[in-house]
Structures are given as C-alpha cells and as structure tokens.
Image (cartoon, grey):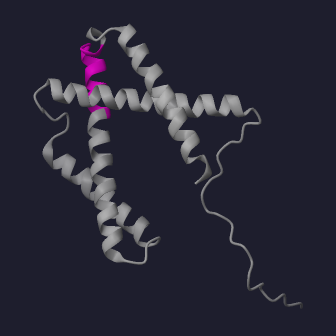
Amino acid sequence: MSFIAPRKYEKKSSSLPKLPSFKNNYLRTLLVSLAMALFLTFSMYGIYGMYADGGEQPIPGALILLIFALLFVVGYEFFNSRFVRRTTSVVVAFLVAFCLTILIMALVKFIYMAYDGSFFDIGWEIFIITVAFCLIISVLVLKYFENF
C-alpha cells in the first residue's frame, strides 16, 4: 500500500465549463459579437416597447419582485465569495439584480411585441440598422474587455 502525499501548491482546476475554442479568430469574434448585438437589439426594442406603452409592465409585479429576489440572492452569494467586505457584495448584488431584472422584463416585452406583431411596425430597415450599430458596439466592448 502506497501513500502519496498531496501537493501543497497544486493548482486547482476551474469548475467553469470551457467555451468552445475556434481556431479561426475572425469566426469566433463574429459569432460572439453577433450574439451580443442581437441581445442588445432585442433588449433595446423591449425597453422601447415598455416606454411606448406608457410604462406598462409585461410581467406582473409579484413575479418581477420574485425574479429580483432570486437574482439578488444568487448574486449576493456569488459576490460574497469574491469580495472581502459584505457591504460591497450587497451593493454589487443589488445593482446586478436590478439591471438583470430590467433586461429580463425588456426581453419578455420584446417577445410580446414579436408575438403581437407590433414589432414589425418598426420596419426591417431600422432593425438591420440597429443590429449593425449594436454589432459595432459589441465588437468594441468585446475587444476592450478581452484582456481582463
């Protein structure tokens, strides 16, 4: 029976799944920035739809509060394990949960608009222009945060 002592400074492997690696950097950048651009476009149209309806919420208020609470709890646990101070993790978790709740509401509103047909009143040319601008913005953001 042999005993192997554990190494003190053994590097832990990350528990996060690895993203698929493309050998072609152009294709990877194009696909990631296109996904980000579509997400931004759908979110912007959802926020526009909520504004055009006079602030009418696409989700009932109780469900919005539940979504916020779940995101806050998950965010608090996530940031509490990374920050030393609890106050910092509470504030960051609150801001992240607030922003994600608004994004979820905007995406749900966009789905309602697409199902209703009111999204198609905007026009396909404006949609293509919006996707193009969001594509440029997403590439800039992607390349800016690439080294972080």
Quadrant of image for the C terminus = bottom right
Which residue ends up furthest to the right in the rendered image? 1
In the depicted view, which residue is nearer to us: 53 or 67? 53
The residue lying toward the viewer, choosing from 143 and 85, is: 143
Which residue does the image show at 71% across and 34% down from the upper left? 25
Q: Position of residue 2 (x, y in %)?
A: 89, 90
Residue 123 x, y percent position in the rendering: 32, 8
- Rendered location of residue 64, percent (x, y): 21, 47
Residue 28 placement: quadrant: top right
Drawn side of residue 94 relative to residue 127, left or right: left
Q: Is residue 33 left or right of residue 89?
A: right
Q: Is residue 80 above or below residue 58?
A: below
- Our reading of the magenta stretch's main secondary structure is helix
Residue, x 13% and y 25% (percent of image)? 53
Residue 143's place in the image compared with 69, above or below, is: above
Is 20 part of what is drawn in magenta?
no
Residue 3 relative to residue 17: left or right = right
Q: How many numbered tags mark residues here? A: 0
Please say whether residue 110 is one of the residues in the magenta stretch: yes
Instruction: Return the x and y of residue 12 as percentages of the image width and height.
Output: 68, 71
Q: Quadrant of the N terminus?
A: bottom right
Q: Which residue is drawn at 19% across and 33% down?
A: 58
Q: In this view, does 79 lie to the left or right of 35?
A: left
Please tell me whether residue 21 is drawn above or below residue 53 in the rendered image: below
Point out the stretch of residues depicted in magenta. 107-119
Q: Identify which residue is drawn at 17% across, 28% down.
A: 51
The answer to which image quadrant residue 95 occupies is bottom left
